[in-house]
Amino acid sequence: MNIELNESEQVAVNTVNESKVLEQAAEILSKRTFGGECLNSVENTTNFLQLKLAGYDREVFSLLLLDSQHRLLEYKELFFGTINAASVYPREIVKATLAANAAAVILSHNHPSGIAEPSQADIAITKRIKDALSLIDVPVLDHIIVAQESVSFAQRGLI
């Protein structure tokens, strides 16, 4: 039996298929990452975070918890916001860092607008988190904003 689909039905089927492929790619990348193979450069980290965060239509703030060799222990989505903001609490980041016994962290969040340029609020919260984690001797290695193009605070000299 051959079923003909109209244009809108075909678009819906293609969207579902693309979503499944992206979910499978994220799962494969997660497995490789948790095996310690992947987060050895800003580019690899950004690719991982693109798969995790780029599909959200609201801001999501996440944390990459790393061991002393900077291998990924855990990826954690901590705060969920609106289309242009998310409330971030340094206390919760410190708690998650201690719970994972992490030696270092990478911060990340998405900009659903598609523009990755850091805001003054992004820079200010990064400093607050960095200051809080310095009290427990855990460095913030980077803060990556995910959008159509991603921005690394470390590459820009903002960390």
Image (spheres, helix red, strand yellow):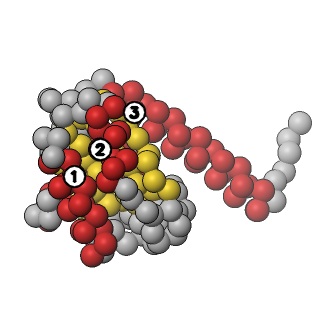
Q: Amino acid at mark 1?
A: Ala
In the displayed structure, 120 sits above or below 59; it is below
Image check: 14 left or right of 25? right
Q: Are marks 1 and 2 in contact (CB under 8 Å)?
A: yes
List x then y, in percent, for residue 9.
78, 56
List x then y, in percent, for residue 42.
20, 49
Does residue 109 appear in this view? yes
Read off the residue under disc 2.
94
User: Outermost residue, bottom direction?
Assistant: 120
In the displayed structure, 42 sits above or below 104; it is below
Q: Are marks 1 and 3 in contact (CB under 8 Å)?
A: no
Marks 3 and 2, the one that precedes in the sequence: 3
Image check: 78 left or right of 41? right
SS state under label 1? helix
SS state under label 2? helix
Q: Amino acid at mark 2?
A: Val
Tell me, for residue 99, which label it has, or none: none
User: Outermost residue, left direction?
Assistant: 157
SS state under label 3? helix
Image depth: mark 3 or mark 2 in front: 2
Does residue 32 appear in this view? no
Classify the position of the C terminus by image quarter: bottom left
Which of 17/150 is in front? Answer: 150
Q: CA distance from mark 3 to mark 2?
A: 23 Å
Q: CA distance from mark 1 to mark 3?
A: 28 Å
Read off the residue under disc 1.
132
Q: Amino acid at mark 3?
A: Ser
Tell me, for residue 30, which label it has, or none: 3
Image depth: mark 1 or mark 3 in front: 1
Location of residue 94 by image quarter: top left
Residue drawn at the location 32% of the way across and 30% of the way down: 100
In the displayed structure, 40 sits above or below 79; it is above
